[in-house]
Image: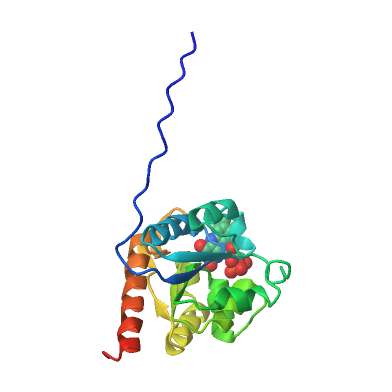
């Protein structure tokens, strides 16, 4: 006889209360590490933050938008020309009142576009529109990361005031050990907290 296990009642999740709620824009680029961004999105939501996610077209090859929509509780921004949802332009509306923009994973392509002011999709246009601090978590193969062109772009972005976390060295999806692994979501969250705390101190005049 087929037995059916009794369904457990829904678990009442505790409300996050460990830090003040901030508005985080999480941009996901098209690399293997995009799967870790789902964990990052969940961690940010559990910490009580309001998370707006956006994905590049390539990112959707690696991670389903439904995952980020469910984890953030909001539709995922993918189309800069979705004027039904965003009559003023998605880049204008989604950048409004942001406390921190996180780009994870940041592809070599996104680093190049940010460094050169190219705005040919929603994520790169948001980078230019956003006035809040930016935390970038690059992820790519070791040869890509070592390219002078990539390093030039990283240096330019550091000069432009962007914060970086990683990449780390370790196991890469191309099946070698090397530099280019995206930092773990908890490390990105830690960096995000430090940046938010520093901007709070600046805002309150303590710095
Ligand atoms: C299997 C696979 C894995 C890839 N992983 C990366 C990666 O980790 N980092 C990266 O910079 N590009 C990676 N790429 C290349 C990017 O997807 C490609 O440059 C793309 O144009 C990036 O688009 P985006 O920057 O708009 O997200 C990968 C491509 C494939 C097919």
* Relative height, residue 10 to residue 111 (above, below): above
Can I make out residue 178 in this image?
Answer: yes
Q: Residue furthest left?
A: 206
Task: List x then y, in percent, for residue 130.
Answer: 53, 81
Task: List x then y, in percent, for residue 67.
Answer: 54, 51
Q: Nearer the viewer, residue 66 or 152?
A: 66
Q: Is residue 123 left or right of residue 15?
A: right
**Rendered residue at 34%/61% (across/down):** 186
**Rendered residue at 48%/87% (across/down):** 156
Can I make out residue 140 in this image?
Answer: no
Q: Quadrant of the C terminus?
A: bottom left
Q: Residue furthest top?
A: 1
Image quadrant where residue 206 sits: bottom left
**Rendered residue at 53%/76% (across/down):** 111
Task: List x then y, in percent, for residue 33.
Answer: 48, 58
Q: Nearer the viewer, residue 26 or 45?
A: 45
Q: Nearer the viewer, residue 105 or 54?
A: 54
Image quadrant where residue 88 sits: bottom right
* Relative height, residue 123 to residue 4 (above, below): below
* Relative height, residue 3 to residue 129 (above, below): above
**Rendered residue at 30%/91% (across/down):** 205
């Amino acid at each position: 006889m087929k037995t059916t296990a009794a369904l457990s009642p829904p678990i009442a999740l505790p409300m996050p209360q460990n830090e003040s709620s901030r508005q985080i824009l999480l941009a996901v680029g098209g690399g293997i590490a995009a799967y870790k961004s789902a964990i990052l999105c969940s961690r940010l939501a559990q910490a009580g933050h309001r998370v707006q996610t956006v994905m590049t077209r390539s990112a959707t090859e690696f991670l389903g938008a439904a995952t980020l929509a469910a984890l953030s509780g909001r539709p995922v921004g993918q189309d800069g020309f979705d004027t039904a949802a965003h009559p003023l332009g998605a880049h204008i509306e989604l950048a409004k009142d942001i406390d921190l923009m996180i780009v994870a994973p940041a592809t070599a392509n996104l680093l190049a576009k940010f460094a050169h002011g190219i705005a040919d999709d929603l994520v790169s246009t948001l980078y230019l529109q956003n006035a809040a601090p930016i935390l970038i978590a690059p992820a790519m193969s070791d040869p890509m990361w070592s390219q002078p062109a990539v390093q030039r772009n990283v240096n330019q972005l550091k000069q432009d005031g962007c914060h970086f976390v990683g990449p780390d060295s370790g196991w890469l999806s191309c099946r070698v050990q090397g530099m280019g692994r995206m930092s773990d979501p908890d490390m990105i969250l830690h960096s995000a907290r430090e940046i938010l705390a520093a901007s709070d101190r600046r805002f309150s005049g303590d710095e």
